[in-house]
Image (spheres, rainbow, N blue to C red):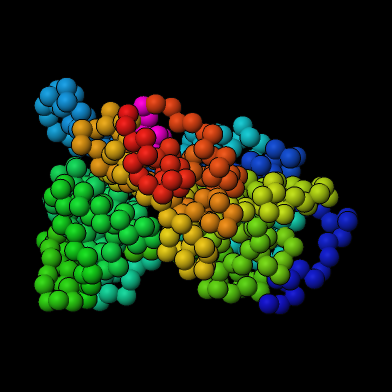
Amino acid sequence: MNASAQGTTSDSPEQSYDFDLIVLGAGPVGENVADYATKHGLRVAIVESELVGGECSYWACMPSKALLRSSNALRAARRVPGAREAVTAGINAGAVLARRDAFTSNWNDDGQASWLESAGIELIRGAGRLVGRGIVRVGGRDYSAPAIAVATGSVPVLPPISGLAQAKPWGTREATSADKVPPRLIILGGGVAGTELAFAFSSLGSQVTVLARSGLLGREEPFVGELVAQALDAEGVEVRLGAAPVSVARNEQGIVSVQLEDGSALQAEELLVSTGRRPNTSELGLEAIGLDPQSGFDVDDTMLVAGTDWLYAVGDANGRTLLTHQGKYQARAAGEAIAARHHGTPLLDSEWGTHAATADHGAVPRVVFSDPEVAAVGLTEREARGKHLDIRVLEQDLGAVAGASLHAEGYTGRAKLVIDERRSVILGATFLGQDVSELLHAATIAIVGEVEMSRLWHAVPAYPTMSEVWLRLLEQYRFGTTDVASGS
């Protein structure tokens, strides 16, 4: 790393800047960095080459969940006698797509841009590029600030499969913004996006095939992938685990053919590739400040890039955890840390401090909006054992809880806790079942607060709610059994 990256040249007290902070990227992460710095009196500009609001608002979180919600609600109604009999038709795909369009404001960012103005943040439209310490070039004009925050998100990565790029496959952007439903859809990848979109397009009428070389939702507990695969199968989705594509081609009629390693072949009108993402930093001019664009960012818990005293990388751009809510959490810490350093006020960057994104290291909540939903936080059993921790594992049938039976006839679900035996605190929690995403925050609070199991005993779940599964888990922890006071 050269001197410019290390920031060895000190700023002159008389040096003037255009802004106190320039943020590259106006997605939810960049907006939060800018907003929290502005709240503390900094003059902030945000640079955006596409739509203000970013990937989450227009091509990821919001449109994908809008595509999923209608079919999830319909299936939930069909699981309740009385409501089931009232359901006399299937999904209206056109109405679902129209609702999706409303959630994206028809890909118009006027509302988001107006919010920036109301918050006192200056919007600079165009592609920003670093050309020196504290200098960003946009459209031939240079802007300066003593602090720069990179919040440019991530982009999809195409695996090295012969003919794949030439076949012009869908990425998640094309899938979530599609204006028609393909009769057949092949999805390459069994991660969160691939799984969610398999449910979405199957419900809209596509014949969907998922090719999951490494299994479904492999980041989570093993039962998650198994039960979600069963649910996909019940919906008519073909899931091929371990399937490895070797070549792809699209013919003159637009049909995509995927040749598999086992010699079989699949055809469809569209192919969606959802096999991973990388930080979107290759066009930022990092080499101009002595950083390797291919190496990524090494940041501390305030999101300050190692070896600098002025450059920050936040959200997907730093590669720590590619989740919108976690990026926004990092952004809140970074925005306030930047302001504290600017004003010379105390930096609260110790563990769980205001200016430290401590939760990144062991308290990351995540939800897959499949049906059943998957909600997890913290460490899985595999991760905890990999850290050589002394753990105890608790598991319960969520369907045995009275509150769950009210949600659905024949409710299928599971709950699992990973306990640190030495400290008697929760390290990780996983819930699977209809509507379990709303159970997650209690587990997140327990992990962040390091609440001992003996104290959790006094957190009484209301009856009859699904949260009563916490009582079942605590009873198992205390008495080593799953049937203590198991009646209603």
Residue 92 visible within the image: no
> Residue drawn 30% across and 49% down?
196
Give residue 179's quadrant in the image: top left
Query: Which residue is outermost to the right?
Result: 13
- Quarter containing the N terminus: bottom right
Q: Is residue 193 above or below residue 260?
A: above
In the image, 5: left or right of 380?
A: right
The reply to whether the magenta stretch includes residue 288 is no
In the image, 395: left or right of 452?
A: left
Percent coordinates x, y for residue 174 in the rendering: 31, 52
> Residue drawn 33% across and 41% down?
483
> Residue drawn 65% across and 57% down?
301
Nearest the camera: 481 or 33? 481
- Quarter containing the C terminus: top left
Percent coordinates x, y for residue 417 in the rendering: 43, 50
Q: Is residue 401 above or below residue 157?
A: above
Percent coordinates x, y for residue 446 in the rendering: 54, 43
Give residue 214's quadrant in the image: bottom left
| Residue stretch in magenta | 464-469
Q: Is residue 243 above or below residue 26?
A: below
The reply to whether the magenta stretch includes residue 468 is yes
Nearest the camera: 98 or 143? 98
Percent coordinates x, y for residue 41 in the rendering: 75, 39
In the image, 186: left or right of 156?
A: left
